[in-house]
Amino acid sequence: MIKVLVADDQPVVLRGFTAVLAAQPDIAVVGAAADGGEAVRLARAERPDVALLDIRMPVMNGIEVARAVTELGAKALMITTFDLDEYVYEALLAGASGFLLKDIRADDLADSVRVVARGDALLAPQVTRRLIAEFSARRRAAAATLLTPRESEVLQLIARGLSNSEIAAELVVTEHTVKTHVARLLAKLGLRDRTQAVIHAYETGLVRAGDRDPG
């Protein structure tokens, strides 16, 4: 049997998810909590295999609860709504194994619990898109703090296909200076060559598909 803890501060959602899971022959609901503090207390007492957690709850939010229950050995399966996905990245860092939207079908809910209980990860497609966007934004922000404004400019021009001599002409500097900037930005970003620099620039949104050579 898969032991499951359900936590959500919306009574209708809590009752609905609990009823769906309790009806499964291979799942036992060992606790239902209306706030994060209660969820952690139940997790310590019942030691569930999977904790189904709303991201926003009073007392302790779902991210804090996810961190606590994973330390107890449980898998955290987060429940989110489309407009709350800014928390997904933080929940992943807290150890969450999966994310579901609250409009999930009953059969899919039970299957999702089974997937996570087996040790696999699970992401709803809508959440995946938001997560990729968030990850890209964070990488872009991290790159911005690593590179000087001039190095960022050089990286952008590399990604647009300019050679060192063309970059030198564009920025009105010597080609040697450009080579120095290129070497430094590659080292700071841990990139092997200009090809990886181009990929990095597109992945982080520094350059977007459709951008053209400024010359």
Image (tube, rainbow, N blue to C red):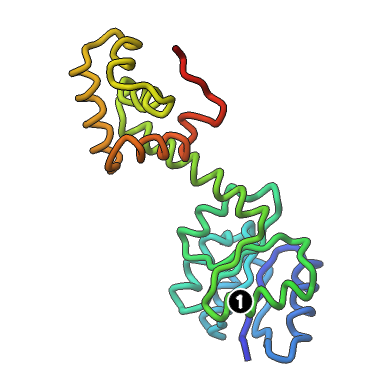
Quadrant of the snapshot with the C terminus: top left
Q: Is 67 left, or right, of 30 in this rendering?
A: left
Q: Nearer the viewer, residue 3 or 129?
A: 129
- Residue 154, relative to residue 104: is it above or below? above
- Rendered residue at 68%/87% (across/down): 27
Q: Would you name the residue on which mark 1 appears?
A: 115
Q: Nearer the viewer, residue 210 or 30?
A: 210
Image-quadrant location for residue 186: top left
Q: Position of residue 75 (x, y in %)?
A: 53, 74
- Rendered residue at 46%/79% (across/down): 73
Q: Position of residue 201 (x, y in %)?
A: 42, 34
- Residue 114, relative to residue 99: is it above or below? below
Q: Nearer the viewer, residue 128 or 72?
A: 128
Quadrant of the snapshot with the N terminus: bottom right
Mark 1: few/some/many CA within 10 Å (<14, 14-19, 20+)? some
- Residue 80, relative to residue 6: is it above or below? above
Q: Nearer the viewer, residue 54 or 205?
A: 205
Q: Is 21 left, or right, of 191 in this rendering?
A: right
Residue 131, visible in the rendered structure: yes
Q: Position of residue 166 (x, y in %)?
A: 33, 15
